[in-house]
Structure formats: structure tokens, C-alpha cells
Image (cartoon, rainbow, N blue to C red):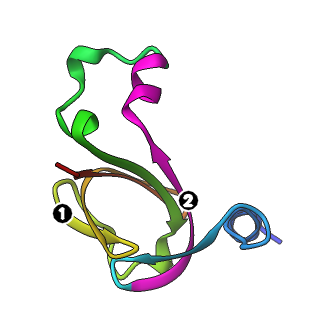
Amino acid sequence: MNFKDTVKTDRDVFLCGSEFAEEHDLDGKKAMAIVQQVSADNIYTMGSNIQTRKYFELYGSHAEVNCKEEDLAEIPVYGQLFRLDGKPYLVMEVKDDIGIVTMVLVANDR
């Protein structure tokens, strides 16, 4: 087994339904993902620079999503509309680290 095979196996464990992940609708495609809803008060109490934050964290939802790259129809980009479980969000950040995509999504709930 080479390193790439080992990493792929680790991804499968990390994103397994019996471990951390749950099934979610990722922009119209059902897949296993880890979704964390982050509240603004959590961000502000964790030492973040409040002056660099935007209005959406005060008036909206902020979610972080981890999923496998191949479970997405396409890798989204900054500013793109992305539906998470049917709710529209805007993509603020995307990182692809050895096949695991981490997205930061925001939605204005006002």
C-alpha cells in the first residue's frame, strides 16, 4: 500500500457515517459530509479580529463543510451559490487538502 492509498483509506474513515459524517445534500448531490454550524458569538470569543469580519456573520448562518472531492459535482469557488441541504449559501472559502474539500459557507438570514 502506498501513501496515496493510505490517505484515501483515512478519508473514508474520517467521512464514514458511523464516525463523524452524516448524509447531506451538497448542491443537489447526496453525500457523506461533516457540517458544522458556526455562530458569530463563537467567532468573536475565540480571539478573531472583529474589524475584519463582515456583516453576514452578524445577521446570518455560517457553516463549515468537509467532504470528499469526488462527492461534489464540481469544486465551488469564492462567491458561488452553493445549496447545503436545500438552503442557499455563498461560498467564502474553499480548500482541497489531499482529496478532502473544506468549504466555508455563509447565508444572510435577515
Q: From the viewer's perspective, is 19 left or right of 78?
A: right
Rendered view: 54 above or below 7: above
Q: What residue range appears in magenta?
A: 29-45
Name the residue located 49 percent from the left edge and 79 percent from the top edge. 71
Q: How many marks?
A: 2
Q: From the viewer's perspective, is 41 left or right of 105?
A: right
Binning the other alpha carbons within 10 Å of mark 1 as few (below 14), some (14 to 19) or many (20 upward) gives: few
Q: Is residue 35 magenta?
A: yes
Q: Is residue 96 magenta?
A: no
Give the labeled residue for mark 2: 98
Residue 3 seen: no
Give percent across and percent down for residue 32: 59, 75
* Earlier sequence position, callout 2 versus callout 1: 1
Q: Residue furthest front?
A: 110
Give the labeled residue for mark 1: 80
Give percent across and percent down for residue 48: 39, 18
Give percent across and percent down for residue 73: 36, 82
Q: Amino acid at mark 1?
A: Gln
Q: CA distance from mark 2 to mark 1?
A: 22 Å
